[in-house]
Amino acid sequence: MGLPRRTRAFVLLECMLAVATFALGALALGKCAENLVKAEQFRREEALAQRALTNYWAQIEAGAIPIGDKAGIALEGAWEGMTMNIVREPLKLMNEKEQELFGLYQVHLRLVWKAGGEEIARELSFMIYPRQR
């Protein structure tokens, strides 16, 4: 004849609760996977930004990129969508005889890009004494 009516209702309630728990678990797992993908994208963009800043720093130090007081460069290739802003400012430093030191500059590199609808920027500053040619 089967189970009594009350027991069948309880089994049905147990099954519905199990399905609801499984559905919540699946939704939570999907959200975790989405966050993982976003974190990996951010890590990739951050690594590209660090590489671009380091490359420009080395090229400026070597004199391969002549710099003026201000420059904005749209990057290409793997750095598509990123913009490098370069600002050079003369430093007003004195030596021990209170004489001004000429030719020293502070260079600010600022890399800007958009990710997830918001603007992200990374900066690098260093001093340079350009080679005299």
Image (cartoon, helix red, strand yellow):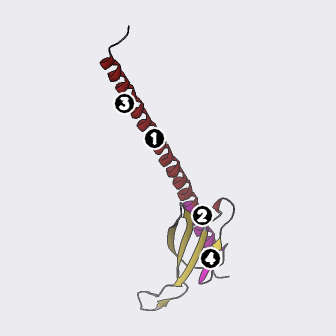
Picture coordinates of residue 112, whole percent (x, y):
56, 69
User: CB of mark 2 within 8 Å of CB of mark 3?
Assistant: no
Label 1 to label 3: alpha-carbon separation = 15 Å
Q: Amino acid at mark 4?
A: Gly
Residue 124, placed above or below residue 31: below
**In the rendered image, which residue does mark 2 sit on?**
52
Give the label, 2 or 4, closer to the camera. 4
Residue at x 56%, y 79% (from the top left corner): 87
Q: Position of residue 103 (x, y in %)?
A: 55, 85
Residue designated by label 3: 17
Residue at x 46% of width, y 44% of height? 32
What residue range appears in magenta? Answer: 49-71
Q: Looking at the image, is mark 4 or mark 3 earlier in the sequence?
A: 3
x, y percentage for residue 67? 63, 79
Crowdedness of circle 4 by 10 Å Cα count: few (<14), some, many (20+)? few
| Circle 1 residue | 27
Amino acid type assigned to the residue bearing label 1 in the image: Leu
Mark pair 2, 1: CA separation: 38 Å
Task: Say which quadrant the C terminus sits in.
Answer: bottom right
Q: Quadrant of residue 75?
A: bottom right
Q: Earlier in the sequence, mark 2 or mark 4?
A: 2
Residue 69 spot, x, y in % from top left: 59, 84
Q: Is residue 63 covered in magenta?
A: yes
User: Of marks 2 and 3, which one's residue comes earlier in the chain?
Assistant: 3
Q: Quadrant of the N terminus?
A: top left
Q: Which residue is mark 4?
A: 72
Judging depth in this view, the residue of 127 and 99 nearest the camera is 127
Report, in whole angstroms, how far the alpha carbon at label 2 lies from the one at label 3: 53 Å
